[in-house]
Image: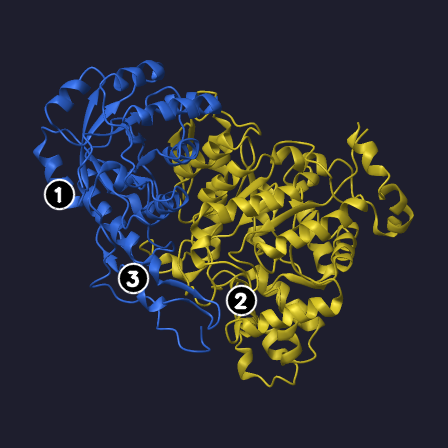
Amino acid sequence: MTAARRVLLGVNLQGFGQRPAAWRVQDVHPTDLIGPEFWADLGRIAERGRLDAVFFADNPSLGDPNVRALGLIEPFTALQAIADATENLGLVGTASTTYNDPVELAERLLSLDLVSGGRVAWNAVTTYNPAVSGNFGVSGNPDRTTRYARAAEFVDVVTRLWATSGTGRRVDYTGDHVEVHAGLDVPRSAQGQPVVFQAGGSDQGRDLAARFAEGVFSVELTLDAAVENRRLLRAAAASHGRDPDDVRIVPGLSIVLGSTEQEANDLYDSLEALAPDGYAEHALSSYLDVDVTTLDPAQPIPPEYLDRPFDENTYGASVGYRRTVTRWVRENNTSVRALVRGFGGYGARIVVGTPEQVADSIETWFHAGAADGFNLMVDRFPTGLAEIVDHVIPLLQERGLFHREYEEPTLRGRFRTASAVPARASASVSASAADLAPGAAPERMSR
Amino acid sequence: MTQTPLAGATLTDAAVLGLLADRPAARARLADLVDAGVPSVVLGVDRGDEGRIDPAVAAQALAALEPRLGVVVAADPTRDHPYNLARRLLSLDHLTAGRAGLALLARRPTGARASTTSWSAGIDDADTPEFARLVATLWSTFPRDALVGDQASGLFAHSERIVRTDHHGRWSVDGPLNSPSSVQGLPPILWFGDADDPESAERARDAGADLVALETDLAGLPGSLAAGHTGVVVRLPTGTLPEAVERIAALGLAGPSGTGSTLRDLLGLPGRPVDTSGLEPAFAAPTEGHW
């Protein structure tokens, strides 16, 4: 018997939490972010909740740590420390296709996949942060078309290199951006080779995902758009000769929990009050490419700002975020003040509420075909993650939406089993609820 | 502080893969190695030709199995970008509580693979000293004691103490590095070259290396130590590690010193604190309400 399709859940390890002030309300010190115990602890909590994976975003540059302290440790190095503290947890790290060497990266990631028992995934990004180029001797990041042309060759050649492991074969690859004549002599890992993720929401990013990605970190704020974008990406994967179920789409989901909705709102407001001045305004401004602090806070954002065309090829920030945030603003454009108040996911969808409300939201999106899973953005680390594991995960397990045990030791193995049965149509959710309810789980586990 | 006569032992990639295939046995083997007076293992200098594992991944795995063991990782300046390499090595150093160091080779081994990345075009062995100095500068840009974490005021870091590199040479790197400095100040840099090659010695000085390694095989080890050399690094054979460890133990070298646990302590090297003099601040000083 085939297991029911279930939600995939990862957690985005963003320093002390997604709330910029998270470090001010927990017993933590800045140097915790570079110590092994902080990361090992988060890994153990995530594994206790049977989460599929932890994830590090990344870019090789330093922003002012007083605004937000992120990326103080290299992702795959931190993931190796987490691997040492866990047995099944997936380990997803970000590395740039613009600012790495493909053979070096391929060898390093396959080595980590080997020593971790087949749990590694690579989130391949092209890097748009303008602060990065100066660290690599170029005057600016290449334009989007060039970045993605290199990315496609880079990802192609890395996966080919991985495929040579244990075979003695070598890759002779001459592209417009990448030339490689090498083989990898790293032994094959338990899952063969690392899983490939992609995170860009531009047209070029989606094409890259449709060709190569097994997981996609998407940016979705509204249900209808998420359903449509997932349908398009699956169709694009099929057009490249792939099974659409081989591409798992996991939008970001920000969570601030409370035992009541009021408690959650109070926590959210107290954390925002401690954040650096103008943090949410700055995030909204950067995604919309307009300084919202110059606008009347009591009025909607004027439509001319939302309707402006922009050159996606040379646009210096994220196309995916701009598209998604613009659509969300159109649907919620009551006032600048209200928009800023509702922008607490800083581009990701946010649920401020009870564990039941979070579980309901996950269930609704999953059954609507908007997502195969979620990349959770947690308000505070480690406190908030433990709360999600203790209060949200059991609800999802009771509803048959999430596994109770790791049924496969490798990350790719779990991706495969999680997609064993196609999504139920949203119309049949209520009718099928009994099938998914608690009684179904023991049978699944005993198979 | 007295430098230890035996600085470490090189392990081939195949030897590491063999160790990691049985981790309980590897723990015992590495403990024996430390007890025999070998303070560190060096990865990536002598890779062998029977399998590969990334030297930094190998170093981290071995360091996790033996908490008293230092780990030294070789970089290839024709392949590794200094920003990426500096960051990964420093991250390894953080997660091993200051037990990491960098190895640089005076001459790349024959058959090494050239990178095709734009920043590596034309880089050769003569550029290794600049690479070493640039990495050391990057390691200095973010003094760890700039991190304060004052929860009451909201001051996370004295960000005005974080500096740029503004390096323009064979590589051009603005900085700062996005990882705070090591508990050991700067992780040590070990230089590997032919002891009879005057150009290698010159480059080691130019690189600001903390230690020039003198490589020997097991047969030559007693002679090298008897001659009073420092920085001796013994090449361990791939297949017969237990026997090799026994032979080293039979030499009766002093075991772990117990005076400290960073790689600098383990090697008996003097401290090398971060120095940001002459470098420009990367960020404005924080002001109330604007951090």
Which chain is disc 2 placed on?
A
Please name the residue shown 62% across and 41% down the image.
Answer: A47
Q: Are marks 1 and 3 in contact (CB under 8 Å)?
A: no
Please name the amino acid that badge 3 sits on.
Arg
Q: Secondary structure at mark 1?
A: helix
Please name the amino acid that badge 1 sits on.
Arg
Q: Secondary structure at mark 2?
A: loop
Tell me the distance, in whole angstroms, between the alpha carbons under discs 1 and 2. 46 Å
Q: Is residue B244 above or below residue A312?
A: above
Label at residue A21: 2
Number of labels in the image equals 3
Image quadrant in which you'd find residue B158: bottom left
Residue A328 in sight from this viewpoint: yes
Q: Upstream in the sequence, badge 1 or badge 3?
A: 3
Q: Nearer the viewer, mark 2 or mark 3?
A: 2
Q: Nearer the viewer, mark 1 or mark 2?
A: 2
Residue B21 in sight from this viewpoint: no
Percent across and percent down for residue A136 are: 33, 53
Query: Chain A hue?
Result: yellow
Relative to A287, B142 lies left or right: left
Query: Chain B hue?
Result: blue
Relative to A292, B101 lies left or right: left
Residue at image mark 1: B205
* Foreground pick, B168 / A358: A358
Residue at image mark 3: B164
Please name the amino acid that badge 2 sits on.
Ala
Marks 1 and 3 belong to one chain: yes
